[in-house]
Amino acid sequence: MNSPLVCTTKREPDQYPQFLYPGEAEFERVVLENLCRKYQVLHGRSLVCESAEFGFAIDEAYVERMNGKVQKLITLKEGRSDETKIKGTLAPFRLRAPRELMEVGYECGFGEKNSMGFGMVKVEQCL
């Protein structure tokens, strides 16, 4: 990751977004759905997105080396009335997904808030 990966969900209507961490039950589903929506917007057609073809795993050795400190809290518009806090994960990860979704993630960013610079990656190894 070159910038934190942000992933959220809303548990109930009108509730604030809940930031998710890799390994939480909803994380993979939310990341997969996000990539599928981006694919559809870019290509004008849907891609069959099955969770059996998708896997996301954070580099646990890296997390251990960092003593678990891989979440970053970013404050936007600090000190203003419209101040916003965004929490993301900044750690290497492995992704198993159809090539088309990997390309969308690489070109557009993984997770949310990509237009603000979140979710940018550098490919270390491609198998």
Image: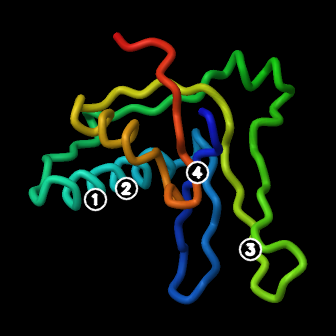
Sequence-wise, the earlier of marks 4 and 2 is: 2
CA gap, disc 1 and disc 3: 25 Å
Extreme residue toward the right, this view: 79
Q: Which mark is residue 119?
A: none
- Identified at 53% across, 81% down, the residue is 12
Q: Nearer the viewer, mark 4 or mark 2?
A: 4
Contact flag, marks 3 and 4 (Cβ < 8 Å): no
CA gap, disc 4 and disc 2: 14 Å
**Circle 2 sits in a helix, a strand or a loop, which is it?**
helix
The residue carrying mark 1 is: 37
Question: Which amino acid does the dot numbered 4 rest on?
Answer: Phe
Contact flag, marks 1 and 3 (Cβ < 8 Å): no
The residue carrying mark 3 is: 84
Classify residue 64 as left or right of residue 41: right
Question: Which amino acid does the dot numbered 2 rest on?
Answer: Asn
Q: Which mark is residue 118?
A: 4
CA gap, disc 2 and disc 3: 21 Å
Q: How crowded is mark 4: few (under 14 residues within 10 Å), some or many (20 or more)?
A: many
CA gap, disc 1 and disc 2: 5 Å
- Identified at 78% across, 74% down, the residue is 77
Sequence-wise, the earlier of marks 2 and 3 is: 2
Contact flag, marks 1 and 4 (Cβ < 8 Å): no
Q: Residues within 10 Å of mark 3 (few under 14, many from 20)?
A: few
Residue 112, horizontal then vertical, whole percent: 50, 58
Contact flag, marks 1 and 2 (Cβ < 8 Å): yes
CA gap, disc 1 and disc 4: 17 Å
Q: Quadrant of the N terminus?
A: top right
The residue carrying mark 2 is: 34
Residue 110, horizontal then vertical, whole percent: 46, 45
Q: How crowded is mark 2: few (under 14 residues within 10 Å), some or many (20 or more)?
A: some
Question: Which amino acid does the dot numbered 3 rest on?
Answer: Thr
**Circle 1 sits in a helix, a strand or a loop, which is it?**
helix
